[in-house]
Image: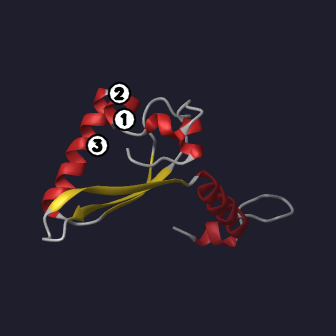
Amino acid sequence: MLRVSRKMAQGLGFSDPAELVGKTDIELYGDAFGQKTRRDDVKIMENEPADHRPDREPPAGRRPGELDATSKMPLHDELGNVIGLAGITHEINEIRQTEMALQHLATHDPLTDLPNRFLMEDG
């Protein structure tokens, strides 16, 4: 890792984001998750498509039920050679909770909380 937000550092149990610089996914999340991430990263660098994962369960060590959205793409030098990978991960728990609340409001009566016609006609 080259840069880490304070929020991510705190979520991983570090007080200073600088403590994470240079660490790998294997060091932070364990061998199984780290190796899978490494394989995925190599595929992105070899095939060069950008990778967007809308949501996934985070690795061990993070709170259960947290969701992340990750985007990765290869980095190129001035000659076009792949020299690395850029990745951005966002925690999307609030977004997902808001989506679920809106879905519930759209499909349930606000007074009784019973399913509305939309759910009864669906299917």
- Looking at the figure, which quarter contains the N terminus? top left
Q: Is residue 119 above or below residue 65?
A: below
Q: Which residue is label 1 attached to?
A: 23
Q: Is residue 74 left or right of residue 89?
A: left
- Badge 3 marks a residue whose secondary structure is helix
How many numbered marks, from 0 up? 3
Q: Which residue is label 3 attached to?
A: 37
Q: From mark 2 to mark 3, how far is it between C-alphas?
A: 11 Å
Say which of 20 and 46 sits in front: 20
Residue shown at the point (67%, 60%) measured from the top left: 98
Q: Tags 2 and 3 in contact by the CB under 8 Å rule?
A: no
Q: Position of residue 48 (x, y in %)?
A: 19, 65
Q: Position of residue 6 (x, y in %)?
A: 58, 44
Q: Position of residue 41 (x, y in %)?
A: 24, 50
Residue shown at the point (56%, 55%) measured from the top left: 92
Q: Is residue 54 left or right of residue 117?
A: left
Residue shown at the point (35%, 29%) measured from the top left: 27
Q: Earlier in the sequence, mark 2 or mark 3?
A: 2
Q: Earlier in the sequence, mark 1 or mark 2?
A: 1
Q: Which residue is label 2 attached to?
A: 30
Q: Is residue 76 above or below residue 69?
A: below
Say which of 23 and 35 sits in front: 23
Q: From mark 1 to mark 2, how far is it between C-alphas?
A: 12 Å
